[in-house]
Amino acid sequence: MLVMPGRRTSTMELLAVEAAGRGMEVRAAEDLGPVPGPAHWYGGPLAGARLAGRLGFALLEPVDDWLAELPEEFTGRDVRSATVADARALERPTFVKPPRDKSFPAAVYADGSRLPADLDPATPVLLSEVVTFAAEYRLFLLDGRIAAASRYAVFGRLDPHPLHTDATDRADRATAGEIAEFVDRLVAAAGQSLPSAVVLDVGQLLDPYRPGHRWAVVEANMAWFSHAYAADPARVLDVVLRAAGPRERVRPDDLAFVRH
């Protein structure tokens, strides 16, 4: 069974069609009755946390400081873990985001006074120097390999486009190959620090001191709460089912990434 909110996004609609085609029952979280068998989740973290115990699924997600702990080789910029209290002391433009949820808008803030006033000072945040990504790509990873991929933005503007290593367009094929090579290096260096089913956003980082571009990690996210954009929904669903499925099926290496 695949459970998701009754008010569906475009990704939810695609995953619901794919799940039904596999013979899975698709139910709205608001209309749940008795649950006859194993359940999987796709939706927000608050509703997912409320339903996890009742339905017996486990939610895999990256740890809060994963991005901050990566070597600069993979981030291409300075990233550090902090709190809202630390962020309020900022005196220069900084990219500030919540590590996992959407409790406040991830954005470049001119200084710490521009953050929402109602935030708890102890709330964890990630602070990053301001950089420019020419293009950004969403990768659904399964066991350290790219299962599905899509471009989602160009210079910060939404611009979804499918990405396949066997693309007919030479430029798309080359980009897919570069991304796969970057991910292979990342997984070799830090693979055990991510769940076996996860979303990784990467981008072409413009550097005024280097010709061309370099690849860098934008962030890692929960597969069960990530938009598919133009990625293959069948392969996206494969990752989602692993990332938010029955607790008894969680692999030993993934236990450290179960949301509590």
Image (tube, rainbow, N blue to C red):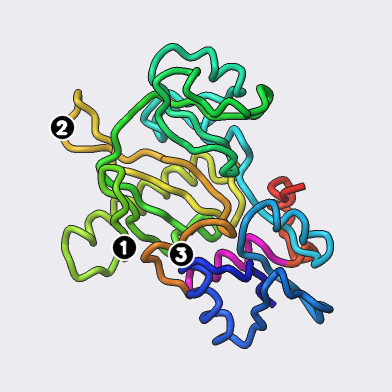
Q: Quadrant of residue 197?
A: bottom right
> Who is closer to the viewer here, 239 or 136?
136
Q: Are marks 1 and 2 in contact (CB under 8 Å)?
A: no
The image quarter in which residue 256 lies = top right
Q: Nearer the viewer, residue 230 or 256?
A: 230
Q: Tell whether 103 sits left or right of 253.
A: left
Mark with earlier residue (3, 1): 3
Query: Is label 2 in a helix, a strand or a loop?
Result: loop
Q: Which mark is residue 199?
A: none
As drawn, is 36 to the left or to the right of 205? right
Picture layout, residue 23 above or below residue 163? below
- Spatial CA distance of label 2 from label 3 is 30 Å
Reading the image, the residue beneath label 1 is: 163
Q: Which residues are magenta?
A: 234-245
Residue 64 against residue 15 in the figure, above or below: above
Labelled disc at residue 147: 3
Can you tell which mark lies on residue 211?
2
- Report whether 122 appears left or right of 87: right
Along the line of sight, which residue is nearer the eye, 147 or 119?
119
**Dot 3 amino acid type:** Ala
Identity of the residue drawn at 41% across and 54% down: 138
Specify which label sits upstream in the sequence, 1 or 2: 1
Q: Amino acid at mark 2?
A: Pro
- Check contact, mark 3 vs mark 1: CB within 8 A: no
Label 3: state its secondary structure: strand
Magenta span includes 88: no
Residue 33 is left or right of residue 25, and the answer is right
